Amino acid sequence: MDALKLWSLSSQPLKHLFRCASSTTTTTTTTTTTTTLRRPYSYSYYSSSYSRVVLRCCSSTTTTTTTTNAGVRNRRVSTSSSTSDRDAVRAIRLKKVEELRSKGLEPYAYGWERTHTANQLQDIYKHLADGEESKSEKDAVSVAGRIVARRAFGKLAFLTLRDDSGTIQLYCEKERLANDQFDQLKALVDIGDIVGVSGSIKRTEKGELSVYVDSFAILTKSLLPLPDKYHGLTDVDKRYRQRYVDMIANPEVADVFRKRAKGAAGGAEARPFVTYHNSLGRDLYLRIATELHLKRMLVGGFEKVYEIGRIFRNEGISTRHNPEFTTIEMYEAYSDYESMIYMAEEIVTRCALAVHGNLTIDYQGVEIHLERPWRRETMHNLVKESTGIDFDELGNDLKVAKEVTLENLGGDLDYKGKSSLEACTSIGHLLNEVFEIVVEPKLLQPTFVLDYPIEISPLAKPHRRIAGLTERFELFICGRELANAFSELTDPTDQRGRLEEQVRQHNEKRAAAISKTESAEDKGKENDESYEVTLDDDFLTALEYGMPPASGMGLGIDRLVMLLTNSASIRDVIAFPVLKVQQ
């Protein structure tokens, strides 16, 4: 639909976002090859000269011969020699994360209000003369991006900030920064960190346009060092495996994918389709979400990305579910889930106007009103409103919470509903189960359900005010989930812990399911929990390089089409739906 081409936030159309197709490949090098190429992972703006790099690759070591205008040097680099150095850097930076939190500073921020990109500032203030500062109130600016270079001299520091558009220098003076911010900058800010900065604009005596910094904040503390800016990374295979690092360190790589945009299973908890690749000798999975690969693009430096793509889930078939369906997923750096509320309203209303010409539509005999703003309510309040149960008052005693819930709802629940409630492993799971059974079918008019429990939201940022909840919403219309969004979790330590817990819980269910299917009465039956779940370590590594604060949303296109065409079943809006074999 044409209406899906919008991206009005920051006055940027959706066509300027990057459309990314996710895939996974594995390569094993068993022969010796010689290749000539430009040095990977080099910061090209440090020098106007280019280097010629000759790689001789084999399975154990890499021999690099580098020729520059300064002469010739030969190096032999072991592929594993830097592991201990990287671990040492990571340990130091983890201590800095702890130090920031001890000072009341959050090293993984929720967002940042920007006024300009680096390239916009370079264009707007190109008239400034050397040594001139623009001091008027209208020239107050705010930028955000990754630190890719830094120099400190006593009470003065210069940093290079890069965003999606380009680079700009940060000019930092001790006397200009409030409190002990200058000391924090020198002690706690590393190359690779993502920061937000406010200040005025000046051009230095040497002619470098700079943000004259008044204040700054660390938005994402990077835990892993970027590749050496001089030697680069000579493992070509690793460049492909960790493309996000390639794009951070070498902007030209990102440009390739911008031009392309013009012309492991993860990101959700669902059973995947599995196949075997004979040449690679490994299992491959049809994707159950596009999420984790799109987030890798944010790590790599893209600030607005989206994909309209097919998703495959090896689960049940119903009027609402098809094993193959279509979604649009989108992510925007430096924003939170409030931005995605606006985006969801914008997409749905524009599509409705394109199809119907008005915002009142009929769906299966129910008049749906799409005029904005739509209702916003927390999951806790909706459950209390429908059942009388106040989960805020139940505390953390799961046994008592189940007793209260069954006492209030027992008469209205069938066997399946009671079993689902009794099987809940936490207060958050219980709250969500009550919501899905009792509240969800009643949400006919557009409603944003806010602030989900952390136990069922492993990829969402913790709520900044309410412990135990996350900054997440789902959009419901006609009793059906249409969109799911949240402020993205960017803390790699927190993310690892949550995903490991998710894998642990699933494996417990899997073991129980396998044991059950091996019993006499269930012999030969396949259980929905019997599939294997593994940890996506590469995604966690990507987060350790630093992902900016961001919001993301997935919206079901098939369900949106159902709504707008008054179609009762998802099979009505898919040209060739999956059906059972005719007997």
Image (cartoon, grey):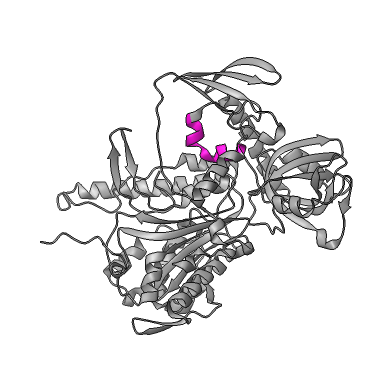
In the rendered view of the protein, which quadrant contains the N terminus?
bottom left
Let me know if residue 351 appears in the view. Answer: yes
Q: Residue at x 63, y 50 (%)?
A: 108
Can you give x and y, in whole percent of width and height, for residue 447 in the image?
49, 74
Q: Is residue 553 magenta?
A: no
Q: Is residue 270 above or below residue 473?
A: above
Can you give x and y, in whole percent of width and height, for residue 261 in the image?
50, 50
Magenta span covers which residues? 237-250
Q: Is residue 111 above or below residue 38?
A: below
Can you give x and y, in whole percent of width and height, for residue 114 in the image?
70, 57
Can you give x and y, in whole percent of width and height, for residue 63 in the image?
54, 17
Q: Is residue 249 magenta?
A: yes
Magenta: predominant secondary structure element?
A: helix
Q: How many numbered marks are there?
A: 0
Q: Residue at x 36, y 72 (%)?
A: 562
Say which of 237 and 129 sits in front.
129
Say which of 568 and 47 sits in front.
47
- Taking 511 as reference, is 216 left or right? right
